[in-house]
Image (cartoon, coloured by chain):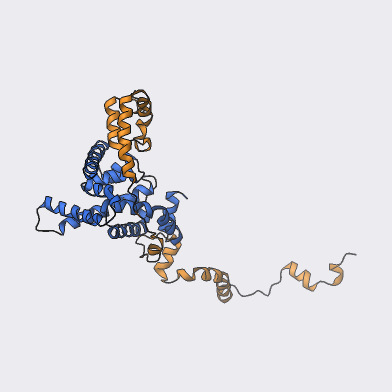
Chain colours: A blue, B orange
């Protein structure tokens, strides 16, 4: 079933169609959210919120404008960015930079409790939100560069700059930790 | 005539930018530059070395595969009401005039002919005493009229 037909059925309240949508897209959305937020519990909330919104707003989906995967990633991305910014605001007295670092340290602290094989995860967690998003969407989510640029609301040129910088930083982090 | 990127020759600088940004796997490269980059790679040892370096980082990135849980049961079991549920126009109309009718729609449709017949019986034309010529012939004819001689 193509994206348009599936969402047409979902918009009519068809739970079986929605279950199909969840099975097809939840794993990728979950990996995306984990890689962006690091914490599993936060990622699960994002996936549930994303798919609940897809259920409620299924009538808004236009298959001619974007693939369903891109549409869902855009919703998930917005929710992840809101979540990351809220985490930063939860330390109101710290200066902005310190606040951002605190949010990243929190993510890194979580990873320290995991196995040492997660060096890569830690390196990705140390990136800024925009660098991390660009890398995760392009590298892990099987989206084209145009789709990633659309989700992030940036030009192709800006996306490539983010990707080059992200890969350089990860390489440096991994070399330092090995 | 303006040529598309896939028709333009790719510069070495642009090829390096692509490898540095997207890594070693052609499937991640911009679609319209993929063919040209592959051609250029075949001719340039310098680019091949850069691709090898990018490939090493790609392999490391591949190591992080987060565990994924199933969301199907959780989500499908607790769906909220849809805000923009699309309905057939007849259902929308029925819901406006007779809330709760939708569940009985099929029963109402099935009973419609009976209801119409009942109404016709009450307010329709009274049965006529005038017999048509055909009815008269059938019911009042002597046997010789109905049988062939």
- Residue B23 position, x and y percent, is 31, 37
Q: Residue sitting at 47 percent across and 70 percent down?
A: B103
> Which residue is nearer to you in this view: B7 or B38?
B38
- A82 left or right of A53? left
- Residue A62 position, x and y percent, is 37, 49
- A81 left or right of B56? left
* Quadrant location, the C terminus of chain A: top left
> Which residue is nearer to you in this view: A112 or A28?
A112
- Residue A148 position, x and y percent, is 30, 43
- Is the residue B149 above or below the residue A170 in the image? below
- Farthest-out residue, right: B149
- Quadrant location of residue B13? top left
- Residue A29 position, x and y percent, is 34, 52
Q: Residue sitting at 68 percent across and 75 percent down?
A: B129
Q: What is the number of callouts on the image? A: 0
- Farthest-out residue, front: A178
Q: Is residue A170 visible?
A: yes
- Quadrant location of residue B127? bottom right
Q: Is residue B10 visible?
A: no
Q: Residue sitting at 33 percent across and 36 percent down?
A: B55
- Quadrant location of residue B46? top left
> Which residue is nearer to you in this view: A104 or B6?
A104
């Amino acid at each position: 079933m193509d994206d348009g037909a599936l969402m047409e059925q979902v918009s009519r309240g068809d739970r079986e169609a929605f279950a199909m949508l969840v099975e097809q897209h939840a794993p990728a959305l979950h990996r995306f959210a984990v890689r962006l937020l690091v914490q599993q519990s936060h990622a699960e909330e994002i996936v549930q919120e994303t798919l609940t919104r897809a259920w409620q707003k299924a009538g808004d989906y236009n298959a001619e404008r974007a693939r369903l995967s891109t549409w869902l990633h855009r919703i998930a991305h917005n929710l992840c960015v809101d979540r990351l910014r809220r985490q930063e605001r939860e330390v109101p007295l710290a200066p902005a930079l310190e606040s951002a670092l605190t949010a990243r340290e929190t993510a890194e602290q979580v990873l320290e409790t995991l196995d040492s094989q997660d060096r890569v995860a830690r390196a990705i967690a140390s990136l800024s939100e925009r660098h991390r998003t660009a890398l995760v969407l392009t590298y892990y989510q099987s989206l084209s560069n145009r789709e990633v640029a659309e989700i992030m609301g940036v030009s192709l040129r800006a996306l490539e700059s983010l990707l080059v910088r992200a890969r350089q930083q990860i390489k440096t982090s991994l070399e330092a930790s090995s | 005539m303006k040529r598309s990127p896939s028709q333009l020759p790719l510069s070495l600088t642009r090829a390096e930018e692509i490898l540095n940004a997207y890594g070693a796997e052609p499937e991640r490269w911009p679609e319209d530059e993929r063919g040209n980059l592959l051609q250029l790679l075949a001719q340039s040892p310098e680019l091949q070395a850069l691709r090898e370096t990018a490939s090493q980082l790609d392999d490391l990135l591949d190591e992080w595969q987060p565990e994924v849980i199933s969301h199907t049961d959780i989500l499908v079991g607790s769906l909220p009401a849809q805000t923009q549920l699309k309905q057939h126009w007849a259902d929308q109309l029925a819901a406006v005039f007779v809330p709760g009718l939708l569940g009985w729609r099929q029963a109402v449709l099935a009973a419609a002919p009976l209801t119409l017949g009942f109404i016709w019986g009450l307010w329709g034309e009274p049965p006529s005493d005038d017999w048509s010529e055909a009815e008269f012939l059938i019911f009042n004819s002597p046997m010789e009229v109905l049988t062939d001689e």
